[in-house]
Image (tube, rainbow, N blue to C red):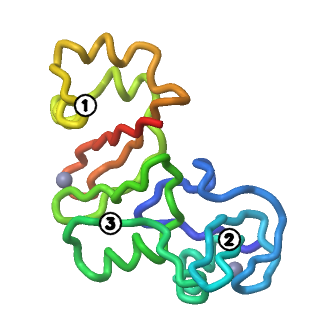
């Protein structure tokens, strides 16, 4: 088996469902791969395509099927934008969300946060939640009880420069 490529901005995508584990032919390079990412082609047919990790990582699948795996709204260098849009597997979420940016660079996506992450939330994590949902900090403890759950997913990112953890709240 070929060695699986690492992704600079996506920590362990093989453990976080960005890739499904199943032997399959890659629609891009036609090689058999034990992992594949599923995306919708932007070509005329709009077919679902199955892409091996190598063809995600080198951007060849994005080129071939006109894919944008992830949106990134904020200002980052063209090289970073290219990596997030075309060379990083897509994060599945209910709302199409923009990739998090901190210290003028894209953050590393760490996967979904768990209850412990919410319990350890920093002041700025809570501040963004207060902004998003119009709540006061006094509501926080009550709010996180039993969360995250299937209706309320929290995505966790980390800044590559200052190390800050960024939580993004995703309500179904
Ligand atoms: Zn491939
Ligand atoms: Zn930072």
State the separation of the CA atoms marked 3 and 2. 28 Å
Name the residue nearer the viewer: 80 or 97.
97
Name the residue nearer the viewer: 66 or 60.
66
Would you name the residue on which mark 1 appears? 133
Please state, as top left, top right, bottom left or bottom right, where the N terminus lies in the image: bottom right
Query: Residue at the front extreme?
Result: 44
Would you name the residue on which mark 2 appears? 3
Instruction: List x then y, in percent, for residue 51.
Output: 68, 73
Instruction: Work out whether 56 lies above or below 43.
Output: above
Instruction: List x then y, in percent, for residue 167.
Output: 32, 40
Judging from the image, what secondary structure is the residue with disc 3 in? loop
Which is more N-terminal, label 2 or label 1? 2
Instruction: Work out whether 25 lies above or below 122.
Output: below
Would you name the residue on which mark 3 appears? 72
Judging from the image, what secondary structure is the residue with disc 2 in? loop
| 80 on left or right of 20 | left
State the separation of the CA atoms marked 3 and 1. 22 Å
| 88 on left or right of 40 | left
Instruction: List x then y, in percent, for residue 44.
Output: 63, 85
């Amino acid at each position: 088996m070929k060695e699986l490529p690492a992704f600079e901005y996506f920590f362990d995508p093989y453990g976080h469902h960005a890739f499904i584990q199943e032997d399959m032919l890659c629609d891009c390079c036609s090689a058999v791969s034990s992992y594949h990412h599923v995306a919708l082609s932007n070509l005329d047919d709009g077919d679902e395509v199955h892409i091996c990790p190598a063809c995600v990582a080198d951007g060849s699948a994005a080129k071939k099927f006109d894919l944008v795996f992830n949106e990134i709204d904020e200002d980052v260098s063209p090289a970073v934008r290219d990596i997030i849009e075309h060379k990083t597997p897509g994060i599945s979420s209910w709302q199409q969300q923009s990739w998090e940016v901190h210290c003028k660079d894209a953050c590393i996506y760490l996967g979904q946060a768990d209850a412990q992450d919410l319990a350890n939330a920093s002041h700025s994590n809570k501040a963004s939640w207060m902004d998003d949902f119009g709540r006061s900090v006094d509501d926080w403890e009550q709010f996180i009880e039993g969360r995250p759950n299937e209706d309320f997913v929290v995505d966790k990112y980390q800044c590559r420069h200052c190390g800050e953890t960024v939580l993004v709240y995703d309500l179904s």
